[in-house]
């Protein structure tokens, strides 16, 4: 072995040792989190906190540590739990006979650290027993939860390597507490159905597709299945059945995590966290065990405890917590279903068509992960992000106002044809064969792929993909997309209905970036607001489309914004990364956002993390004010992206989610096309760096018009990539420029409608 080999080997050993050292705190919290269960009482949560703090004290060599939480009523940081080697904090500070120690937000070091969300390291004179103190804020997005304080007998005890990992560990501590305490129950808060005959229920398509399966009405699931499970009459037997059902439920959830066809491990973990915690929680399950030991059947015990928890959550005023009722019911249904199946085949959604009054994004994702066949919603409409997500997940979804949907019992055979807006109830064999034979399902992938989008004369028009989840990114690769033109980063927030830590976001974004294998990836910062409100976590507004949304929301929640930007920069290490800001109204907001991005770059440099230090920076043009300011915006960013859906909505004053106005939403409106042309003209040298990522980018009538305006980048759904490439091949550059010239000369909508009808005849689809 040469001297150079020895040196390299030594460097590798040092590197491994360094990784072990700098990650010791976060690794310890990771290990501890796997044993965390749902906390149903302060005592249980304090026990967990003591264990976490004692571990951090041991690893850092500190003398003592404590967690202080923010009390809104007193506007102070109040001592929650502490620990030290001499038992000082436990015996004195935690004594029920003493008033809890608290700190003012104005006149104390912990208060200043909390208020400014800045880590503070304090050094004291040699006369004092404690010579170093570290105070780290515990935050979750824009939420300030409290502070962690560690104290050491030596000066200079908290070096930079330790500090970086301690901050990461404290961030994880916040994540654990938010998730695990979500099920601490507050004080007490406030029949047979005839089988319908064969018939067809009409509705509206939210997500196309066809499915055949059995009805699963979620408004009566717990009671319905509990009543079908007979009791053995023996407490011992019922206990054995209950424990076996728990084992089956746990195995099923573990299988979902490990072998989901969606492949989005991180998102699956976020969605299923609550159920996994509940299956580990002794107090939750002990209520059922105690009921069985007292003579109740296993089914009744599960139903009663689940209903107790679900009712209390549903009665809570905060929507985010009220949603937890469905998590409880879903787990209860799983346990009961496994109780009802002595053959241990277990419960599956794979042949079920779920009937519901409402569905949350997290519910939709969970059902898709578990292979649900389809969904029918009873209501007047569905939000835009539910439709988008359902399409991403390839789940057929139908919306209907027909009240007879409520009469359908569990297990009734159904055929859902969401594409044509029909639900066939108890179809006979003749009807079933006729429907399935004429379903006209997807004809499959084309026999070849066009590697790069271009016109028939060779003029390049890049076709990239819009994505919401990892499955979209993987589909984009399969469909031949030339990269990711738009990743809607708000979808993990919406699915979780909560803010995510930097680490959680990093893992999600990194999976998106690596899936593209070197192709360009543009990550849009969260467009929260409008029809994508975080229920219970952001302020409700009378007119959310004209409120705090997009970049306004991010700039109003700087800590959340910084978490996201740092996660994106880290995820883009070694990649062709673009970061794009949504709903920019003018150059001032763009400059503010760039300033925050530069700040995050400096922070990551100081931390020594691996990250992309020079991402492409872009702004979305979705507002009329941004369209007017195109030239200024182009001077201060690397690329622009036209969000045509919102731009059309604001130009025409038509809410695209309002069914009563949808007929007025016209992509080919003369005013809309004129504005698009002005944007390209005013972009100057950046015209070649403009992309269009709204629905018009895949509209076969408008694709050649956009190309004729000079737009050379289109971003569409993964399923539309190849169709757009095929459409582009029908035209030469001369063709599209002539078409665009003709269209821009039209000033009236009725004339435009006539032109489009003729255009379809002249240029039929390939």
Image (cartoon, helix red, strand yellow):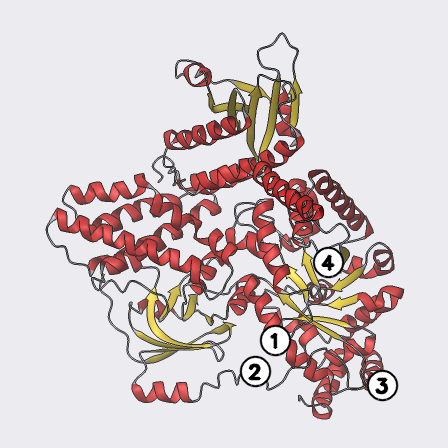
Q: How far apart are marks 1 and 3 (CA)?
A: 28 Å
Q: Distance between the residues labelled 1 and 2?
A: 8 Å
Point out the tag, 4 or 1, that comes first from the N-terminus. Answer: 1
Q: How far apart are marks 4 and 2 (CA)?
A: 30 Å
User: Around disc 4, counting alpha carbons within 10 Å, would you say few (fewer than 14), some (14 to 19), or many (20 or more)?
Assistant: many
- Residue situated furthest left in the rendering: 233
Of circles 3 and 2, the one toward us is 2
> Pointer 1 and pointer 3: residues touching (CB < 8 Å)?
no
> Pointer 3 and pointer 2: residues touching (CB < 8 Å)?
no
The residue lying at 31 percent from left, 39 percent from top is 283
Q: Name the residue under label 2.
A: 445
SS at mark 2 in the image: loop
Q: Where is residue 368 in the image (x, y as percent from the top left)?
A: 45, 65
Q: Which mark is residue 578?
A: 4
The residue lying at 66 percent from left, 89 percent from top is 766
Q: Is 439 situated above or below 46? A: below
Q: How far apart are marks 4 and 3 (CA)?
A: 32 Å
> Pointer 4 and pointer 1: residues touching (CB < 8 Å)?
no
Of circles 4 and 3, the one toward us is 4
Point out the tag, 4 or 2, that comes first from the N-terminus. Answer: 2
Q: Position of residue 538 (x, y in %)?
A: 58, 45
User: Around disc 3, counting alpha carbons within 10 Å, would you say few (fewer than 14), some (14 to 19), or many (20 or more)?
Assistant: few
Q: Which mark is residue 637?
A: none
Residue nearest the observer in this picture, 218 or 659: 218
Q: Which mark is residue 479?
A: 1
Q: Residue 734 carries which label?
A: 3
Residue 532 visible in image: no
Residue 741 visible in image: yes
> Pointer 1 and pointer 2: residues touching (CB < 8 Å)?
yes
Point out the tag, 4 or 3, that comes first from the N-terminus. Answer: 4
Q: How far apart are marks 4 and 1 (CA)?
A: 21 Å
């Amino acid at each position: 072995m040469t001297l150079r080999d020895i040196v390299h080997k030594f460097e590798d050993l040092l590197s491994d040792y360094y990784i072990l050292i700098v990650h010791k705190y976060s690794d310890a919290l990771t290990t501890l989190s796997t044993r965390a269960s749902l906390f149903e009482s302060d005592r249980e949560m304090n026990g967990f906190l003591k264990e976490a703090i004692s571990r951090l004290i041991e690893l850092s060599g500190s003398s003592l540590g404590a967690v202080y939480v923010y009390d809104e009523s007193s506007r102070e940081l109040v001592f929650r739990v502490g620990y030290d080697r001499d038992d000082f904090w436990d015996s004195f500070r935690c004594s029920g006979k003493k008033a809890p120690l608290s700190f003012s937000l104005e006149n104390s070091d912990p208060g200043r650290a909390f208020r400014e969300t800045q880590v503070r390291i304090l050094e004291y004179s040699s006369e004092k027993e404690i010579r170093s103190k570290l105070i780290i804020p515990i935050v979750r997005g824009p939420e300030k939860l409290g502070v962690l304080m560690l104290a050491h007998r030596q000066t200079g005890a908290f070096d930079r390597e330790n500090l970086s990992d301690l901050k990461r560990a404290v961030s994880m501590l916040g994540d654990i507490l938010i998730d695990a305490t979500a099920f601490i129950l507050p004080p007490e808060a406030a029949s047979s159905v005839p089988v319908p005959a064969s018939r067809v229920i009409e509705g509206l398509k939210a997500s196309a597709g066809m499915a055949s399966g059995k009805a699963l009405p979620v408004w009566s699931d717990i009671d319905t299945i509990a009543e079908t499970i007979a009791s053995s009459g023996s407490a011992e037997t019922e206990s054995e059945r209950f424990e076996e059902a728990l084992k089956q439920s746990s195995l099923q959830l573990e299988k979902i995590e490990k072998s989901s066809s969606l492949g989005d491990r991180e998102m699956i973990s976020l969605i299923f966290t609550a159920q996994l915690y509940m299956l580990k929680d002794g107090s939750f399950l002990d209520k059922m065990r105690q009921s069985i030991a007292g003579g109740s059947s296993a089914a009744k015990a599960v139903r009663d405890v689940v209903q107790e928890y679900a009712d209390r959550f549903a009665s809570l005023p905060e929507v985010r917590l009220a949603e937890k009722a469905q998590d409880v019911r879903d787990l209860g249904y799983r346990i009961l279903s496994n109780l009802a199946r002595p053959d241990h085949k277990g419960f599956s959604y794979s042949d079920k068509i779920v009937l519901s009054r409402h569905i949350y994004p997290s519910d939709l994702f969970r059902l898709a992960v578990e292979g649900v066949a389809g969904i029918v919603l009873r209501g007047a409409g569905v939000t835009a992000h539910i439709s988008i997500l359902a399409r991403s997940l390839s789940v057929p979804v139908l919306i209907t106002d027909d009240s007879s949907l409520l009469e359908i019992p569990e297990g009734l055979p159904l055929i859902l044809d969401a594409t044509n807006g029909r639900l066939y109830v108890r179809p006979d064999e003749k009807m079933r064969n006729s429907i399935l034979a004429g379903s006209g399902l997807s004809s499959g992938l084309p026999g070849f792929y066009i590697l790069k989008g271009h016109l028939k004369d060779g003029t390049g028009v890049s076709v990239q993909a819009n994505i919401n989840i990892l499955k979209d990114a993987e589909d984009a690769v399969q469909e031949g997309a030339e990269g990711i033109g738009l990743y809607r980063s708000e979808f993990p927030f919406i699915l979780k209905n909560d803010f995510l830590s930097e680490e959680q976001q990093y893992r999600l974004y990194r999976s998106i970036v690596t899936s593209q294998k070197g192709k360009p990836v543009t990550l849009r910062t969260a467009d929260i607001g409008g029809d994508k409100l975080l229920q219970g976590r952001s302020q409700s507004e009378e007119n959310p489309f004209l409120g705090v949304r997009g970049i306004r929301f991010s700039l109003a929640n700087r800590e959340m914004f910084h978490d996201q930007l740092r996660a994106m920069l880290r995820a883009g290490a070694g990649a062709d990364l673009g970061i794009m800001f949504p709903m920019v109204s003018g150059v001032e907001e763009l400059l503010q956002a760039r300033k925050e991005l530069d700040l995050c770059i400096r922070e990551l440099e100081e931390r020594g993390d691996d990250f992309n230090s020079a991402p492409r920076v872009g702004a979305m043009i979705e507002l009329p004010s941004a369209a007017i300011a195109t030239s200024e915006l182009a001077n201060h960013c690397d690329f622009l992206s036209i969000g045509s859906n919102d731009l059309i909505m604001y130009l025409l004053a038509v809410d695209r989610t309002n069914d009563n106005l949808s007929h007025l939403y016209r992509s080919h409106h003369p005013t809309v096309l004129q504005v698009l042309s002005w944007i390209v003209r005013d972009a100057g040298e950046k015209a070649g760096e403009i992309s269009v990522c709204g629905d018009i980018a895949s509209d076969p009538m408008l694709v050649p018009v956009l190309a004729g305006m000079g737009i050379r980048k289109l971003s569409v759904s993964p399923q539309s990539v190849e169709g757009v490439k095929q459409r582009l091949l029908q035209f030469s550059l001369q063709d599209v420029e002539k078409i665009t010239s003709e269209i821009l000369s039209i000033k009236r909508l009725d004339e435009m409608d006539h032109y489009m009808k003729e255009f379809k005849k002249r240029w039929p689809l390939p």
